[in-house]
Amino acid sequence: MDQEGCDSLPFDYFSLAMEYGMPGWKLFKSLRLSVLTSQEHNSSLGYTKHIIPKKNGTKRVIYEPQALLKQTQVRLKPIWLDMKVDRDINITYEPYSSSIYRSLKRIENHHTYVILDIKNFFPNISQRYVEDLLLRAGYNKEVAALIAGIYCVTDKGRRFLPQGGPVSPLISNRVASMMVDPIVQEILPAGWLYMRYCDNLILSCPEEPEMNPWTLVTSIMSAVKSAGHFRLHKSGVLTPKNKQKILGLILNESLSPPRRYVDNVRALLHNIATKGWETEHINYRVRTQRDVNLSQFRAVVRGKYQYCINNLTSTHKLQKLTALWRKVS
């Protein structure tokens, strides 16, 4: 943008840009990319929309920001890092976050677990919620609207926090800390522990609880719904009679990924090592009925491998997987 265009911008653009060491025109152009929409699709011009099939037959929508917009979002990340969250509750996407294994280790072998999901979490984080976070942090209305606008997307006429933005998980933690966690903590009976993995709520009780766990589920779901911001679904109660599996880990046995899962990953890596990525990619598409390209397939395999090595407790299995990964990478 030329100097004349920059001269017409409000002072707050420049003060914010100077504070984070970037030209004012980049900040302004990033906001335009996020806010301006395509008339054909009624969606933000600054994002590429990806539709990812899920195992249950539904689809996940990922919004990939253009390079300049992404760069600006990352540059302004300290704004969100300055908003502290409860380390015991928020167990992912934070600078201090460790592996799922380490996070769940402190609730291993508890008697009862309750699990809940926040329904359509990212699409329901409206730009107004993001602005509210900034207002609470002390920003004035104009600057709060500016910053929130840079991080939100327009799709089908709505402005919300997109899944796929480099800082979106960090912001979503702060929204949940403001609008969900206090409600759960207020209802939580004495002796229970609460943690959250993004939109996955995990409650646990070391001993057999006095309250019926399903009564607790109903109370929390009702209270969150009454607050009017989000709804919870996919509730479950895991007792010692069940396989107490949370985030892919079994908590009432030796804390590790299920044996069948590890065996499947090892077989997948073995097939890639012997047949090649292209052949196994075709087999994967046929087997899972998922329309993924080769690059996406590589990312899926890498994710499965990383999950195993981050959480496996068996040195022997770890060595086998690592050796196979070296052959295919």
Image (cartoon, grey):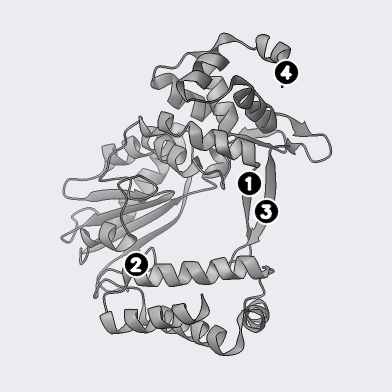
Side of 237 relative to 22 (left or right)? left
In the rendered view, tell whether residue 314 sits above or below residue 131. below
Marks 3 and 1 in Cβ contact (< 8 Å): yes
Taking the spot 50% from the left edge, 19% from the top edge, the residue there is: 18
Please give the residue where the numbered disc 1 appears in the rendered image: 63
Q: Residues within 10 Å of mark 2 (few under 14, many from 20)?
A: some
Circle 3 residue: 50
Residue at 41% across, 39% down? 176
In the picture of the structure, the residue carrying the numbered disc 2 is 310
The quarter of the picture where the N terminus appears is top right
Classify 10 Å Cα crowding around label 1: few (below 14), some (14-19), many (20 and above).
some
Given this view, does label 4 or label 1 mark the residue nearer the observer? 4
> Marks 2 and 1: which is nearer the front?
2
Instruction: Report the front residue among 46 and 183.
Output: 46
In front: label 3 or label 4: 4
Q: Is residue 134 above or below residue 267?
A: above
Per the model, the C-alpha gap separating discs 2 and 1 is 27 Å
Lower sequence index among marks 3 and 4 = 4
Question: Residue 84: horizontal and vertical position, in percent?
Answer: 32, 33
Q: CA distance from mark 2 to mark 3?
A: 28 Å
Residue 259, how many percent across, how many down? 36, 82
- Mark 3 residue type: His
Residue type for callout 4: Asp
Look at label 1 and name its amino acid: Tyr
Q: CA distance from mark 3 to mark 1?
A: 6 Å
Q: Which mark is residue 2?
A: 4
SS state under label 3: strand
Q: Residue furthest front?
A: 3
Three-letter residue code for mark 2: Asn
The location of residue 285, given as percent across then percent down, is 66, 76
Q: Is residue 271 left or right of residue 132?
A: right
